[in-house]
């Protein structure tokens, strides 16, 4: 919750000593409220006042970090309900659940599948964020499987057990890697809170309904825990969506701190063992406020759509994603293959490249840096103009890769063909179709 | 601290648009809450699924798709019947792709005959999409509108360039207009204003806000729909209160991720499941954004999305 200058002023010594570099405590408080200063610049502020201020300044939804090092992920700190208001902050983490009661071979296979579900798209690496290990046998087995999965996957863990003894055994094995503990319930809260404190791990609380969840987070917060995750154990997909919306609204609009935490979801709970339905529910969680989404498996045919959807939902709506500017080889182009150019707006790139692919005619596609704008917008903004395109062509090695000198430009910028021909003397400038959908017909007609 | 449920009731409501004939007619829209926000206000029905049929056998479809559809694709009426009887489609969407003057160039008469045959074959409402060429669509949809008058069709796309002709056809023969604009809140609103100014009731318009598939701009369509829904429900802006339709099948099945075989892309896994999920995740995302009608293609995607739509409706 943002603090006002006056809120801060109340906590300051009010001596106007000027040691902070500002003549009065009030002026310093105002500066602080606007983010123009740090509290530590006042050497005289009391410890209690500093603690009170940092608590009050906490964001309406807390950040939670699971794991350590490069593989760690952070969720929470979201500030809006709708992505057009402001970009969502931390992409949700998606990963599979592995049961400790299954055989070593099955566990090894599940870990291998999890690691294999990794894709490159628009210069981002898309992969599982964690592996959840659920205790379905004894405590020692849980600990052993947790250690094994942590080591082999290299991913942060979510540890799932209701029995604190199981959790304690697993934390003794993997505690320093900061797994998420799932979950403190009404039945085991004291023990789980103690374990989370002892091992400095984030803790998920699970209870039926947000009322009961809030009671548990207050208990955990009172014990000094800050990194909490909530699970309202919804009885249906419809109830899950309601709880996600209510929790986000309560945190952001009512500033209701006991629900100001990221949400963990289990879309498979409502899918009757159908992995397709589970994936569709997971897609709903990606759009509507799931921060940690636990699936029954991480097969590539479901991780790819979910991770790409997540990438879409979490992009900045004001600043579209950009494809890397370079010459792409589509199919296996040879010296006779056509050479087309377009802009680096990621959507433009995806659509043009998939139309070329659909034509089954191998080609070179030059993606020119037009600051992430689509063809017409970029042209209007002076970012997809003859000089830039010519520079791109001359800087690339395309002239050595093709035996012809035809460059195909989008039909939407037909008007630049003359000027581009002057800039690129060695090349014949050809005007391609206006719509990407007409590219296959265009290429086939050219190929004769 | 006590927790109070942060219920937000709406100031406006989505219009109810009725398509079809007699007792098999179907109402769409009507909610006084954001999609699946049944806890905020009245949400009388889940989104409807309109399954596609094409006026000519589609070429070069992914094997995962043609295999699941079986050998119905050469006859639109048979295909439509399979969609309804085997796959439980709520509606049928006839895609008049072969009327494209740069393609098969089928005539308005050919197109009207196809729609007639489909409307006779099924007892569910029929949505009709032209090929997307504004001029040709104007002629084709006029012919369709005057040929099939015993049921209320939804005909489109009516765009900035041809809305006058399409609206006139709908006005003359009692049909509903699908008004399409390119992913833009203001343009969607403006087209609704223009169409209603011609005298068509506001509850005879369905908005197609345009969309992409997952990975191909789904987030733009999603966000434009969320903004339209908020304008309709929170600001009570009556020119944004039309139900929405998403013509997503063609977007999904154009994408490499839905089409590529496992041999071509081994790292992407099972092609059949991946294709179905590409369509299903696109459809559910758009439904959460605000779609009232989902135009879909693969029977398995339809099945799983229908389950999810019911599961999300309390
Ligand atoms: S250093 Fe602290 S006490 Fe001194 S003027 Fe600044 S805020 Fe006030």
Image: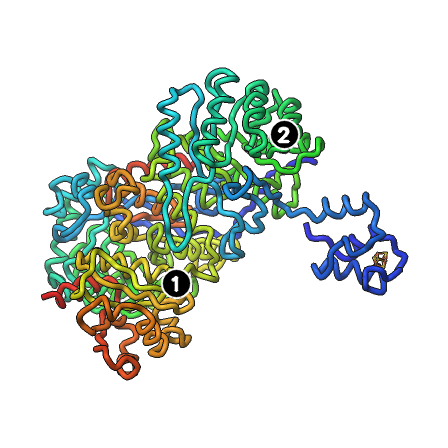
* Whether residue B64 is situated above or below residue A448 in the rendered picture: above
Q: Residue at x 38, y 20 (%)?
A: A103
Q: In what quadrant of the picture does the C terminus of chain B appear?
A: top left
Tell which of B259 and A370 is nearer to you: A370
* Whether residue B151 is situated above or below residue B181 in the rendered picture: above
Query: Mark 1: few, some, or many residues within 10 Å (few <14, many ≥20)?
Result: many
Q: Secondary structure at mark 1?
A: helix
Q: Is residue B309 visible?
A: no
Q: Is residue A125 visible?
A: yes
Q: Are marks 2 and 1 in contact (CB under 8 Å)?
A: no
Q: Which mark is residue B188?
A: 1
Q: Residue at x 23, y 37 (%)?
A: B87
* Discs 2 and 1 lie in a common subunit: no
Query: Mark 2: few, some, or many residues within 10 Å (few <14, many ≥20)?
Result: some
The chain identifier of the residue carrying mark 2 reads A
Q: Which residue is mark 2?
A: A199
* Whether residue A367 is situated above or below residue B272 in the rendered picture: below
Q: Mark 2 and mark 1: span between their CA atoms?
A: 55 Å
Query: Would residue A446 appear left or right of A53 to someone viewing this image?
Result: left
Q: Residue at x 65, y 48 (%)?
A: A59
Q: Which mark is residue B6?
A: none
């Amino acid at each position: 919750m943002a603090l006002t200058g006056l809120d801060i002023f109340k906590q300051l010594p009010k001596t106007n000593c000027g040691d902070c570099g500002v003549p009065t405590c009030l002026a310093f408080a105002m500066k602080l409220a606007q983010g123009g200063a740090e509290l530590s610049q006042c050497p005289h502020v009391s410890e209690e006042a500093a603690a009170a201020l940092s608590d009050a300044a906490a964001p309406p939804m807390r950040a939670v970090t699971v794991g350590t090092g490069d593989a760690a992920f952070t969720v929470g700190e979201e500030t809006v309900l709708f992505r057009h208001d402001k970009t969502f902050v931390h992409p949700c983490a998606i990963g599979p659940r592995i049961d400790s009661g299954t055989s070593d071979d099955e566990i090894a296979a599940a870990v291998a599948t999890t690691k294999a579900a990794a894709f490159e798209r628009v210069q981002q690496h898309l992969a599982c964020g964690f592996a959840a290990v659920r205790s379905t046998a004894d405590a020692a087995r849980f600990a052993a499987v947790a250690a094994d999965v942590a080591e082999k996957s290299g991913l942060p863990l979510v540890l799932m057990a209701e029995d604190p003894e199981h959790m304690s055994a697993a934390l003794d094995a993997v505690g320093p890697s900061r797994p998420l503990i799932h979950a403190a319930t009404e039945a085991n809260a004291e023990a789980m809170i103690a374990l989370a404190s002892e091992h400095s791990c984030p803790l998920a609380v699970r209870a039926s309904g947000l009322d009961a969840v809030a009671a548990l987070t207050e208990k955990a917060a009172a014990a000094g825990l800050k990194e909490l995750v909530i699970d309202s154990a919804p009885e249906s997909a419809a109830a899950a969506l309601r709880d996600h919306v209510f929790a986000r609204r309560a945190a952001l609009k009512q500033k209701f701190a006991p629900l100001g935490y990221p949400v963990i979801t289990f879309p498979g709970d409502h899918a009757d063992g159908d992995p397709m339905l589970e994936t569709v529910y997971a897609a709903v969680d990606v759009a509507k406020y799931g921060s940690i989404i636990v699936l029954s498996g991480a097969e590539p045919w479901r991780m790819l759509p979910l991770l790409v959807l997540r990438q879409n939902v979490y992009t900045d709506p004001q600043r579209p994603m950009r494809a890397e500017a370079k010459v792409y080889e589509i199919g296996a182009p040879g010296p006779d293959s056509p050479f087309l150019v377009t802009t680096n707006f990621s959507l433009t790139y995806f659509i043009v490249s998939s139309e070329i692919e659909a034509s089954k005619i191998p080609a070179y596609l030059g993606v020119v840096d037009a600051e992430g704008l689509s063809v017409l917008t970029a042209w209007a903004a002076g970012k997809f103009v003859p000089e830039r395109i010519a520079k791109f062509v001359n800087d690339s090695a395309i002239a050595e890769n093709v035996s012809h000198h035809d460059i195909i430009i989008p039909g939407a910028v037909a008007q630049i063909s003359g000027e581009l021909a002057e800039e690129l003397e060695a090349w014949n400038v050809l005007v391609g179709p206006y719509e990407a959908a007409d590219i296959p017909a265009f290429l086939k007609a050219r190929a004769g | 601290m006590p927790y109070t449920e942060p219920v937000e009731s709406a100031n406006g409501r989505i219009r109810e648009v009725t398509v079809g004939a007699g007792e098999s007619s179907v109402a769409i829209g009507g909610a006084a809450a954001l999609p699946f926000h049944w806890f905020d206000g009245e949400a009388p029905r889940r989104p409807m699924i309109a399954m596609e049929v094409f006026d000519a056998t589609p070429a070069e479809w992914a094997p995962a798709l043609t295999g699941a559809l079986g050998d119905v694709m050469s006859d639109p009426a048979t295909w439509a019947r399979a969609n309804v009887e085997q796959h439980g489609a709520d509606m049928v969407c006839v895609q008049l792709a072969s009327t494209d003057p740069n393609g098969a160039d089928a005539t308005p008469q050919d197109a009207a005959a196809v729609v007639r045959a489909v409307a006779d074959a099924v007892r569910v409402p029929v949505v009709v999409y032209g090929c997307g060429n504004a001029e040709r669509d104007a002629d084709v949809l006029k012919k369709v509108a005057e040929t099939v008058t015993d049921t209320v069709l939804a005909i489109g796309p009516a765009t900035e360039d041809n809305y006058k002709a399409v609206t006139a056809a709908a006005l003359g023969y009692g049909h509903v207009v699908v008004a399409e604009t390119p992913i833009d809140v203001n343009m969607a609103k403006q087209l609704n204003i223009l169409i209603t100014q011609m005298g068509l009731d506001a509850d005879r318009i369905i908005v197609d806000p345009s969309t992409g598939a997952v990975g191909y701009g789904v987030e733009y369509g999603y966000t434009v729909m969320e903004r339209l829904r908020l304008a309709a429900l929170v600001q009570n802006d009556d020119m944004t209160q039309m139900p929405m339709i998403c013509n997503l099948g063609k977007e999904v099945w154009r994408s490499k991720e839905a089409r590529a075989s496992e041999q071509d892309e081994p790292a992407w896994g099972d092609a059949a499941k991946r294709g179905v999920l590409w369509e299903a995740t696109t459809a559910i995302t758009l439904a959460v954004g605000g779609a009232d009608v989902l135009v879909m293609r693969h029977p398995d995607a339809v099945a799983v999305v229908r389950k999810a739509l019911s599961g999300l409706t309390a």
